[in-house]
Structure formats: structure tokens, C-alpha cells
Image (cartoon, rainbow, N blue to C red):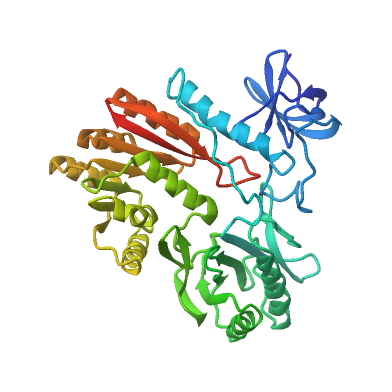
Amino acid sequence: MRPKRGEHLDLTISDLAYGGKGVAKLDGFVVFVASAVPGDTVEVEIEKVRGNYAESKVVKVISPSPHRVNPVCEHFGYCGGCKWQHLEYAMQKKYKEDQVRQALIHIAGLKNPPVEPIIGAHKTYYYRNKMEFSFHVGDNGGTLLGLHFAGRFQDIFQLNRCHLQSEESNELVKFVRERSMELGLLPYHIIEHSGYLRFLVIREGKFTGETLVNIVTGAGVYPELKVLAENIAQRFPRVKSVSHTVNPEKANIARGEKETILFGSDHINEILGERKYRISANSFFQTNSYQAQRLFDLAVELAEPSRSETMLDLYCGTGTIAVYFSDLVQGVTGIEAVEDAVHDAEVNMTLNSIRNCRFVAADVNEFLKQAVDAHEKYELAVVDPPRAGLHPDVVSSLTAIRPRKIVYISCNPATLARDIKEFVQSGYELNRAVPVDLFPHTFHIEAACRLTLR
């Protein structure tokens, strides 16, 4: 049965698709249902009909699933984040683990992939160490400071309380909004491209208690911004840095061409295990410090490093993994295309008095090709690529180098499985695959895999 757009149907949800939508079957025809939970019986309205599936929204929950729970956030339902708050956490973990398994079966072609139980989060709320909040003009001309409505980049809702970062972060958002209005600092209008204040970025060292605030604005000179920074520091003693980034372009991103320090240092510190890391306003760092430490411990466990081994760290970012492994191997070579990240990696190396790491600002693909030509040898490789996964040439060059062990960390089960298939066809065996939940109440899932040369 093929439904029609606008049609209302009663459906029972049987599964969750990657991306978080519920799945129902209508005489074999797949219907994706936003905000539905497996076990729900719901009345839906069909919104789109494609070739072999339809998309719909819930009109009414007829019979709730036993796994449905009341979301704790007042903004649930229209906020773009935490879309699984209405699904009990045990089931969130189950479906994430299964998504990794199914990807390895259907994409990598492994009949019985060695997927282990997911490493769940001890803290399912207040776990993020970085949040970006957007300024916008309210209906009454006042200042909005909050988050985006789901699927609507130009619309911001006023944030009352978010359960992702910390209670102090919520207080900081409220304070900045109210004080900026008192100082006459106008919010930026996304559509008209007028006003000044664009973003408020808050970064927290979960293990150090230090906070960094970055205020992103349009072009212009406003002395009141310095006053706002001083007021923030006076009101919140944990704030060790307040910076100002100028983004004069129309692109609606919390980055810019110029950064100045309005108060304190130009960075804060975070600690993972026995290592200290420097975090500046725009440097990359895993957004869940608690689970990042567990992920890196897992990476060490999978790698089984030896002090006689040389290690490649591909897409090394600010050197977090390289620094974490440094005492366990003979030496680490980290490759990263972003030069600012390489600079931060070198700072992190110095911060921890490490001498056996080197970081190279280069395209990973080009570096590996040169390494193959130079007959360079590495016994261990750790790869942590972007969501798009590895370029086929990267897989080809890495398998030509033939490290005995590869630890592959991924935030996308589909591209992970695609690349695992290539490694297996090139002489490697997948020994272990461990999902790790870095983002509770979202559909996002991390996984770490161990491949060994057959």
C-alpha cells in the first residue's frame, strides 16, 4: 500500500532508523516517523512520498511504547538537539549498538561482526564541554539568545535552560543576554544582516573547572563589549578567558577572521587521564570530556602498544590521541591538514613535556603517498577521520605501508563499515568493534575498531 501526501494513518513503530526516526511498515512499504519510539502506536500525517518510502510526523500517540519516557527539557520537541530524550537510555544504547552491527553486516559484508557491548555514558546530562548559542532579534525588538529550532537555521528560540553543558552555563547565557541589552549591544539579524552580537560560545574544562567564553560579533568597534567581558569575569569566577571573534561575513558560523582577548588568558586547560590539554576559542576538542577519556583508554586497549613501535596518528587534530599514546610507544607522527590545529598539538606536546611526537601540517592522502614512496614503516596506525571517512587513496596507501595494527575511530557507522570492507579485502582482519556513546539523547554514535594484518 502506497500512502498519499496528507493522508492520516495509524501505525505501530517497529524500529529506529539511523538518524533517529521511527520505522513503520505499511504492507511492506516503509514509513519514517519523526519523534516516534519503537513500540508506539501513533496517528501520523504523511508529509512526503518517495520511490520506496514515505516521511511523516506524529499527530497523536495512540498507545505509548513502554520505552517512552518524559523528556526532562522544556524545549524538547522544537529544539534541534537531544531528539532522543523521550526514549529510555537503555534502549538508546541498544539501538546505537545495533546500528554499528547492521552497518558492518550490510555494508562491510561481515556475516558475524565482532561487535561488543556499547560503552554507555555515566553522565547522560550536563556532559558537553562546548556549546554555541545564537543571538537574534526578538519579535518585540529585544535580544534573543538561545538555540535553533529544528530544521530552521534562521529561527532562534529564547533558551531558558539547557541540560547539555552545565547549570553555570545556563546562568551565563541569561546574564550575557540581560547585560548586553543593558549595555545597548544589539543582536545580529540573520536575514537582514544588521546588528552586532552573533554568537556566544562557552567552553568548559570538565576536569579542571575552567571556563572560556568567546563572543562572536559582526564588524564594528563597541567599547561596551570590553565592559561586558569584565562583567562576565566578575560574576563568574570560573571564567578564565573571554575572547572576541569578528565575523564580518554573511556566513552564519561561530568563527571569524580576527580574535582578541578581552579578559584573562587566551585558553583554558582540560585534563584527560594524566595528560593536560590546552583549549583555545577555536581549537578542536572532543565535546564530551568524560567519554573522550574512556574512548582514548579503549583506543589504547585495542592498540596494545609497545615501546618498540612507531605510530601514525592520522587526522590528529590538536594531538589529543598522540599525546595520550606518547609514553606507550617509541614515537608518534601526527598528520593534520589544519595548521592552527598542528600548532595547538605542538603546544600540547610541550605542555606535557613530551619529546617523541612530531606533528606535520599536511593532507593525509599526500603524506601517505610520500611515505609509501620513501618506504617508511609504522607498526601501529590510529585513524580518526571526519564523518566522510577515508578517501580510497588513503586506504590504498595505508595498506601499502602495512602497519600490523590499525585502530579506526569513527563517528559514522556507514563510512566506517565502507572502509572496513576495503581493509578486509586488502589483507586485514576486524578483531574488535566497540561502540561508544559520546552523545546521549541523540542518534550520534562513535565506534572504535581494531584491525590486524593477516
* Picture quarter with the N terminus: top right
- Residue at position x 30%, y 55% in the image: 326
Q: Give above or below for 81 relative to 36.
A: below
Q: Give above or below for 259 relative to 45.
A: below
Residue 196 in sight in this render: yes
Q: Give above or below for 404 relative to 227.
A: above
Residue 407 in the image, given as x and y percentages of width and height: 36, 39
Taking the image as shown, residue 397 lies to the left or right of residue 28, namely: left
Taking the image as shown, residue 223 lies to the left or right of residue 65, namely: left
Q: Which residue is the extreme one toward the left?
A: 374
Q: Quadrant of residue 160?
A: bottom right
Q: Quadrant of residue 65?
A: top right
Tell which of 14 and 142 is nearer to you.
Answer: 14
Residue 336 in sight in this render: no
Tell which of 380 and 343 is nearer to you.
Answer: 380
* Picture quarter with the C terminus: top left
